[in-house]
Amino acid sequence: MKKLLSVLMMGLFVLILAACTANEDAGKEPEGSGGDDGEKTEEAAEKVLYMNNGQEPTSFDPPIGFNAVSWQSLNNLMEGLTRLGQSHEPEAATAEDWDVSEDGKVYTFHIREDAKWSNGDDVTAGDFVYAWKRLLDPNTGSPAAFLAYFIEGGEAFNNGEGSADDVQVKAVDDKTFEVTLISPQAYFLSVITNPAFFPINEKVAEENPEWFAEAESFVGNGPFNLTEWEHDSHFVMEKNEQYWDAENVKLDKVHWAMVDDTNTEYQMFQTGDLDTSDVPPELSEQLFADESAEMVDQAGDYFYRFNVEMEPFQNENIRKAFAMAVNQQEIVDYVTKNGEEPAYGFVSPGFKDPSGNDFRETSGDLLKTNVEQAKELLAKGMEEEGYDTLPEVTLTYSTLDTHKKIAEALQQMFKENLEVDVKLANMEANVFAEEQKALKFQLSRSSFLADYADPINFLENFQTGHSMNRTGWSNEEYDKLIQSALKEADEKKRFEMMYDAEKILFDEMPIIPIHFYNQVYLQNEDVTGIVRHPVGYIELKWAEKK
């Protein structure tokens, strides 16, 4: 891998130190100058947090913006019945409390009397009924709809086999919301902290179906309001005085830039134009050594998807050959360099089974780098398909400097370990996502951040026809195990089903895991109280800036 190291390192440090010119609107808002007496203007005295969103949000429509660049910020504009607290556990939020039936299937939530929308309307149980049924409505086309399949009647409605009336959610009265589940769900209160389950002001949405598309029309119920949105440039949130817990929100504003280059982001942090930043791989060793960089856990995977419906990856042995030719350890050591753990399975560490054992440790390494075996499998697969020459392979990634570096590392590994020339292609993130869903790529990068704290959330993605599958892969036994696990109340049996399912996934290899996520960041020492959940999205509700 000497070639890989020299290619990656050559000239990158020089680029880091070079001045980066960013859109003048991407960083700080201009502060007003003081008067003749030197007093600060009102704007300069405000507590403004400067964050980077990376790119334009896909959508601030809760069931549609199914990615971090939408939900990370939306999580601070809106709020569900529960919210992840500072200890990462679900707490009372828009609902002040709830009752659970003896069989664990019926939850009755009592919505706060002082829960208001940013336009002053009351948040009602009807707003949750409207939002949750809209999430499941097949006409909405939400990629997150599967998260609500634990609701009685939810999956049938979403699949076109049932009606909205069959979905067991109802408003008992204006402030009482009831939901019936298909079975007891130990993680239910965590699931509904997810932005897919945020309420929607029914009156506003019916009057303007595009209420979420501009700052002027946006109506939320969270700690902050969306007050400015210059598309593809920046957006601004201000403290929501209508929020039921406004007295504990300390920031006046949050300004979000849209900078998709880690080096530029770092330069903006250095100049004070951002209060937080990712860590450029080229500086990670130095920043960890001087204790500037912080690291916290995050449940999720960076991985690649094979399209099993396109040559040559319809062949299982060829897929395994490509997977075994990848050296995950070298990627985290020499490419990303942010202390990530290499991934040899799909469920990330940190989830305990009923015996107290970590899922990842129990399931073990289901893939390991093995160049000699990879060569043998490639030859075997080519013989099975009658290939004298392997069909041309293109690896596609969404435009981001880190994605490019990892793609280039894989390209070189495939060349060195399999003697296969792989072409690289990249495209803008939103277009990439649509093309990947439509199975337009042979081999493409991907990522998954857990939506709730349970291994089933990782594994349910690869069911036949699932919106998150995006590989064309299908296995009947795998589907049965996942469906059974989703309904199983016995935790020991449920975990055994999940262990079996993950093994099937790697026996047929429709994916190549690269590394498990963590959160490595730099933060202004004057900023405190930002909560980064291992499972979930960033919380600015408790953030403070001196």
Image (spheres, rainbow, N blue to C red):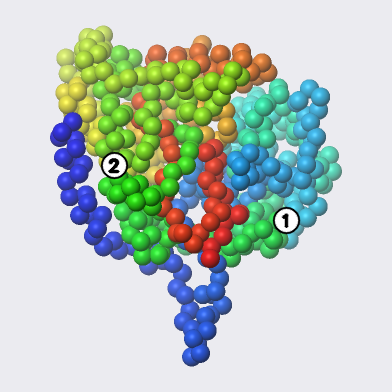
Above or below — where is 254 with respect to 112? below
Q: Position of residue 52 (x, y in %)?
A: 44, 55
Q: Nearer the viewer, residue 289 or 469?
A: 289
- Estimate the spatial distance between the alpha carbons at disc 1 and disc 2, rounded to whole Å: 44 Å
Asked which quadrant contains residue 185, the reply is top right
| Residue bearing the label numbered 1 | 244
Asked which quadrant contains residue 473, the reply is top left
Residue for point 79% across, 31% down: 100
User: Mark 1 or 2 closer to N-term?
Assistant: 1
Asked which quadrant contains residue 357, the reply is top right
Residue for point 45% across, 73% down: 30
Q: How many marks?
A: 2
Residue lying at the far front in this picture: please name it: 290
Q: Is residue 485 left or right of residue 301?
A: right
Residue 404 numbered mark, or none:
2
Q: Nearer the viewer, residue 201 or 539?
A: 539
Q: Position of residue 419 (x, y in %)?
A: 16, 23
Q: From the image, state whether disc 1 or disc 2 is nearer to you.
A: 1
Disc 2 residue crowd, few under 14, some 14–19, many 20+, Cα 10 Å: some
Q: Secondary structure at mark 1?
A: loop
Q: Position of residue 362 (x, y in %)?
A: 48, 17
Disc 1 residue crowd, few under 14, some 14–19, many 20+, Cα 10 Å: some
> At label 2, which amino acid type do we have?
Lys
> At label 1, which amino acid type do we have?
Trp
Check if mark 1's residue and mark 2's residue have beta carbons within 8 Å: no
Q: Position of residue 528 (x, y in %)?
A: 53, 56
Residue for point 16% across, 40% down: 6
Above or below — where is 4 with respect to 420? below
Q: Secondary structure at mark 2?
A: helix
Above or below — where is 181 with respect to 363? below
Residue lying at the far right in this picture: please name it: 173
